[in-house]
Image (cartoon, grey):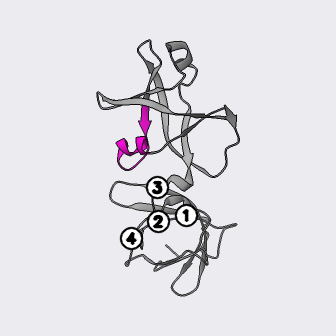
Amino acid sequence: MSQEKTSTIVVGKLGAPYGIKGWLKVHSFTDDPQGIFDFSPWLIGQQGKWQTLEVSDWRRHSKGFIAKFANINDRDEAMALTNAEISVDVEQLPELPEGEFYWRDLIGMTVVTTKGYNLGHVDDLMETGSNDVLVVKANKKDAFGQSERLIPFLTDSVVIEVKHEAREITVDWDPAF
């Protein structure tokens, strides 16, 4: 069944087929890799076309996972899904505790310093291993010659406040840095 992609979030990617009965390798992007199987149904996307698929079975395999879908019964059908994105409806995401955020919630927020200097907007986030980093872009080079800044997402020391309703993040950051 083909459908429009609405408010969804990518949670993984399908890999190569496994065996001859329609199983596929699954690459999970969720914090707990096994958590990808808590979502149902999956929206599988390739070349702008999306279809809804139900995982009928899954298991751990080597260092990853494999999954079997209802109505995908042979290697050729599975091969057609290789490298497809796995998305789910954002309504399936669990509520987060106070002070925690999904990256998608921070994208587009305005970033201002504690002294009121507008640094730009959050264009992306990066994971560095020790902490997440905000990629903040300005519309043009500012007075300090910068159009992009990488600001560590360290609560209390750098990120002072995230105002969801105002779509604004206040940071303790020197604009010249």
Residue 62 placement (x, y as % from top left): 28, 27
Q: Earlier in the sequence, mark 4 or mark 1?
A: 1
In magenta, the rendered stretch is 26-38
Q: Earlier in the sequence, mark 3 or mark 4?
A: 3
Residue 144 placement (x, y as % from top left): 59, 74
Q: Earlier in the sequence, mark 2 or mark 4?
A: 2
Q: Which dot marks residue 145?
A: none
Q: Nearer the viewer, mark 3 or mark 2?
A: 2
Q: Is residue 74 visible to the viewer in this orientation of the structure? A: yes
Q: Earlier in the sequence, mark 1 or mark 3?
A: 1
Question: Where is the N terminus found, in terms of image quarters?
Answer: top right
Q: Which residue is mark 3?
A: 126
Residue 65 placement (x, y as % from top left): 36, 31
What is the secondary structure assignment of the residue under circle 4?
loop
Q: Identify which residue is drawn at 46% across, 65% down.
A: 101
Residue 34 forms part of the magenta stretch: yes
